[in-house]
Amino acid sequence: MPDNGKITVLVADDHMIVREGFVSLLKAEPDLSVVGQAADGVQAVELIRELRPDVAILDLNMPKLHGIEVIRRTRKFNAQVKMGVLSINKDQKIIDEALRIGASAYLLKDGPSRHLIEAIHIIMEGGIYVSPLLRPQALLAAARGPAQADPLESLSSREYQVFSFLVEGLRAKEIAARLDISPKTVDTYRANTMRKLHIYDIPGLVKYALQRKLTSLE
């Protein structure tokens, strides 16, 4: 933390209006200082390396590099920065993966603004913050107990990421760039995903994602 006592924050989101909204919210807090903004994953990594903020708030589905990969890369050169994910994605697999590789917070974009402020202070004190809006889902799942296996649970974290990008309409080359893997590897993950879900075309994947409310596509 700088000498003036303020917590320095970097915000990364490819939607300018959304990003600037978060920045305005954070600037209104007397103990927070926004030191940088990033519009894609690669820029986020570069600015975290250069500016060394106390906290980095990251969107997941950013151009050039997925938010999960931003966290993974950042952890290799900076173990001190606290990283929080701010996303519309409520899937437990993604939440678990983000926290496993080094995120300290997972928040929902449709949550109240106070959650973001609370999360920053909690993770700066060494805690972990998960949006309270996600807890009812976890409680309901636990209450149901053993049930029929969810096909999504059979997907690896990489397969799920590829699935998410396919649903958004990205091509193999674009997905490869965001995940820092080869297009051939993307094709392998896509084939595995379709086999596990028993869906063998992109429109079918999109329909499945809409039915499961895994995407906001209309």
Image (cartoon, rainbow, N blue to C red):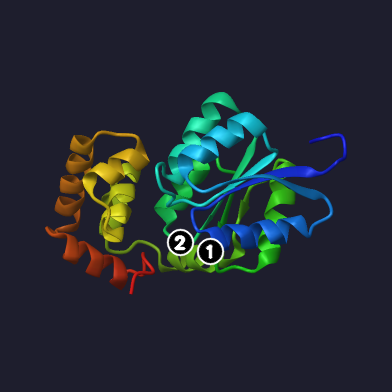
Q: Observer-nearest residue: 171 or 199?
A: 171
Inspect this view and state whether residue 101 appears: no
Q: Does residue 139 appear left or right of residue 20 in this picture?
A: left
> Residue placed at 52% from the left, 53% from the top?
13
Amino acid tagged 2: Lys
Q: Which residue is mark 1?
A: 134
Is 69 drawn above or below residue 149 in the view shown?
above
Query: What residue did someone put label 2 on?
Result: 90
Residue at the top extreme, as displayed: 77
Q: Residue at x 24, y 65 (%)?
A: 206
What is the distance, in whole Å, between disc 1 and disc 2 at their CAs?
7 Å
Give the percent coordinates (x, y) of residue 52: 66, 32
Q: Residue at x 79, y 36 (%)?
A: 1
Q: Give the quadrant of residue 109.
A: bottom right
Q: Residue at x 14, y 58 (%)?
A: 198
Name the image quarter holding the C terminus.
bottom left
Q: Say which label, 1 or 2, has the lower sequence index.
A: 2
Callout 2 secondary element: loop
Give the class, few, some or many, for how many residues have Cα within 10 Å of label 1's Cα (few <14, many ≥20). some
* Residue 1, numbered circle: none
Residue type highlighted by circle 1: Leu
Q: Secondary structure at mark 1?
A: helix
- Above or below 155: residue 118: below
Query: For this rendering, which residue is in front, 49 or 60?
Result: 49
Residue 91 drawn at (x, y percent): 41, 58
Using a 10 Å C-alpha cutoff, classify the residue at mark 2 as few (fewer than 14 neighbours), some (14 to 19) or many (20 or more).
some
Answer with left or right where residue 41 lies relative to residue 133. Answer: left
x and y percent of residue 176 in the render? 29, 40
In the image, 9 versus 116, the foreground residue is: 9
Q: Residue furthest bottom?
A: 218
Of the two numbered discs 1 and 2 in the rendering, the one whose residue sits closer to the viewer? 2
Verify CB contact (< 8 Å) between mark 1 and mark 2.
yes
